Amino acid sequence: MTQSYRFPPGFHWGAATSAYQIEGSPLADGAGPSIWERFAHTPGMMANGDTGDIACDHYHRYKDDVQLMRALGLQGYRFSIAWSRVLPEGTGRINQKGVDFYSRLVDELLENGIEPNATLFHWDLPAALDDRGGWLNRDIAHWFAEYANVMYKALDGRVKRWSTLNEPWVVTDGGYLHGALAPGHRSKYEAPIAAHNLMRASGAGIQAYRAVGKHEIGVVFNIEPKYPASNSPEDIAATRRAHAYMNEQFADPALLGSYPPELKEIFGPAWPDFPEDDFKLTQQKVDFVGLNYYTRAVVKHDPNAYPLKAVPVKQPNTTYTETGWEVYEQGFTDMFTWFKQRYGDIPLYVTENGSAFYDAPVAEGDVVQDPLRTSYLRKHLKAMHHAIEQGVNLKGYYAWSLLDNLEWSLGFAKRFGLYHVDFATQKRTPKATAKFYAQVIETNGAVL
Ligand SMILES: OC[C@H]1NNC[C@@H](O)[C@@H]1O
Ligand SMILES: [Ca+2]
């Protein structure tokens, strides 16, 4: 009897994007600058000098892009709200035109039978708040709750699924430890403070929702399962540190109200002694958790690696994507098992999963042939199905991404889209993977 990959009835199929990566017009209609507007216009920070000034011009083309979603039969669309469109200074004065853009987008989605799934913060912090310390200022928990309340008031009811943050680990590792992402800081003293305040803010946003919200709210983490390069005690300890640093540092304060001991081991004197009361804020009941999965890491001890003393080991005889990530669908299944064991049976969504591969230039009107991306998707959907068969409470899947877009400081060259975007003409062209995904949705997985 051949294995059936049909998903449970009602499994939710969508696609995801984020504001700065697709919208363009970052300063239009009264919007204030974000830290990504500043970072992208800082020479040397972005591959090829790419910026989000135009991106996919989604700010103007959103109605056409909703039709692209409808063409695939998407049931949901996960997008993020640019905080500084809505509150140009981050707090206080509301820019109604900014709110109106998201209200129009939500109405367009609903009119086309697509469920809006809104993320409040996907990295584009208002520059005015960064000038006041940003994630290093404990007041940001209140700034975030104020912003969240503005959006709850404007959209809750039409938006029935909210996320506070997207991937806080990337914000702190990229923005505060290594500096490759906005705001470009390089400090092992700042990273833990930013990480902690991100989770305090997320908690404050959830608390605010409990007072006024009528639907669901959660938080989105990137998870990269870690595997030891050998059975040596050093490599196993290094793997434990890498796992705690990326996969537990944010979910633990949110879901367990504590930090794993490895973080004090990693950061030493740079690890603050956080007040116990803070965990009353970071730990809130969530209606779901979003998990973003791309790849795994095989880890070995390296005394010179700062500050983890652990480095990834490239694997032989396997496929890597354009972002240097190993195609390893077993890690997808393993991730769910680990999460359920550590945090319990919390409803889960895959809020991002996808791959960047080189796409040959597309002839007029054709479908972009992208076999490697289709293979990645098929393998990962099957791996996800195995997790559901093992009893993981998985409610839905959002492919990253609807469109080719600005892959942050890697620029436009890293293409994750189901639709190819010609950034010179803004023409969207479906890739073969988009056609395949449409069949997956239509058959609820039976086609896999
Ligand atoms: O790197 C691919 C994606 N990963 N998660 C966050 C998104 O903004 C990225 O484009
Ligand atoms: Ca700064």
Image: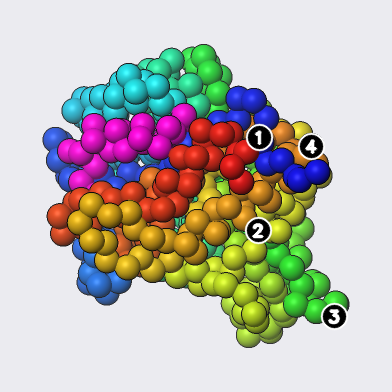
Mark 4 vs mark 3: which is more N-terminal?
3
Kind of residue at badge 1: Phe
Does dot 3 land on a helix, a strand or a loop? loop
Tell me if residue 197 is in the magenta stretch.
no
Image quadrant in which you'd find residue 254: top right
Q: Is residue 315 visible?
A: yes
Looking at the image, is 307 positioned above or below residue 222? below
Query: Which mark, residue 329?
Result: 2
Q: Does 13 appear above or below 422?
A: above
Color encoding of the figure: rainbow
Q: Quadrant of the N terminus?
A: top right
Horizontal relation, residue 146 to residue 172: left or right: left
Three-letter code, disc 4:
Gly
Determine which residue is flagged by label 3.
232
> Furthest-front residue in view?
1
Name the disc covering residue 391, or none: 4
Q: CA distance from mark 2 to mark 4?
A: 18 Å
For label 1, the residue is 7
Q: Nearer the viewer, residue 247 or 61?
A: 61
